[in-house]
Image: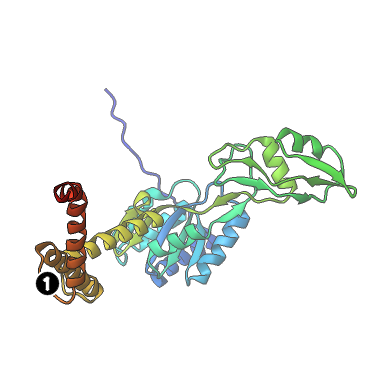
Amino acid sequence: MSVLARVEYKREKPYPESKIRLIKSIEEYARKYKYMVVVSITGITANVLHETRRIIKSKGGMLKVVKNTLTKLAFERLKEEKKGLEMLEKHLTGQNAIIFTNENPFEILIYLSKNKIKREARAGDIATSDILIPKGNTGFPPGPIISIFNKVGVPTQIKEGNIWVQKDTVVAKKGDEITQDIADLLNKLGIKAIEVTLQPKAAYMDGKVVEGPDLEIDVGKYEEQVTQAHREAFNLAINAALPIPEALRLAVAKAYFEALSVAETAGVITPETAERILAKAHATAQLIYEKIKDKIEQSAS
């Protein structure tokens, strides 16, 4: 029985100066910035990367496309300074970039999510929102493109020597797969229809690595939960008559009207209840009179 020993490859030749500079640059950024977020850039276009880089720079950070092997070497050299950084290494597969920032990574990722960048549609893409071709002049003269309009169901007419779209037309709803015809038409019209943002794989924060799924926050959901919690706490404070500034005025008003109701029910005459008690007594007397008035009249006759 043969035993196969696992032999790790070790590079014998020194790295070229250009690669050494890349390793050192990652080390410098890791020392300069408090947090790092590894993001996937697979399928991300150069224009989207450029715009994302601009957005992150405006927040005081930077986005750097990295080589996985060189980045792992940089992390290895930083393991004494940045405890736990080696845990990021398993996420360095595929095509990646790193966001270096001194701001809370959650805030950066939420900001990116709110500022998604649109790119050209490709066949097979999934529509991130309803895609509409607006009414008006396309600027295209009559030609083969008319057949594409017809295929995707966009009504057109020829006017003033150009193709005009007769009405706003949704060619794909959110969640639909983009066909080749739709992609071709959108790109010819210059409509960037697919919203994209960088997908986080993991973040290094204060000596710990936070996995990608834990970095994705549904802001709308949390806002709704906070609003609901505030509403329930406010109602509890009023019902429990807690003497806090936010609830005191309504709690006093509630207690006043409850006391007024008890006094009216019990027939306690006060300046506040007299009019309503007398009105109620009058109405009751009137009701009794209506029920017995026929008997009174018969007795009188």
Residue 148 seen in the current view: yes
Viewer-nearest residue: 251 or 96: 251
By what rule are the colours in the image chosen?
rainbow
Identified at 40% across, 49% down, the residue is 91
Residue 270, given in percent of the width and then of the height, sits at: 13, 75
Residue 174, given in percent of the width and then of the height, sits at: 55, 42
Farthest right residue?
Answer: 161
Identified at 39% across, 70% down, the residue is 31
Residue 299, given in percent of the width and then of the height, sits at: 14, 48
Residue 18, given in percent of the width and then of the height, sits at: 55, 62
Q: Amino acid at mark 1?
A: Ile
- Left or right? Give the position of 51 relative to 100: right
Mark 1, residue position = 269
Identified at 81% across, 38% down, the residue is 146
Viewer-nearest residue: 69 or 172: 172
Mark 1 Cα within 10 Å, few/some/many (few <14, many 20+)? some
Where residue 275 sits, quadrant-wise, is bottom left
Q: Quadrant of the N terminus?
A: top left
Viewer-nearest residue: 178 or 256: 256
- Left or right? Give the position of 109 relative to 295: right
Question: Above or below — where is 230 with respect to 165?
Answer: below
Residue 74 seen in the current view: no
Identified at 30% across, 58% down, the residue is 228
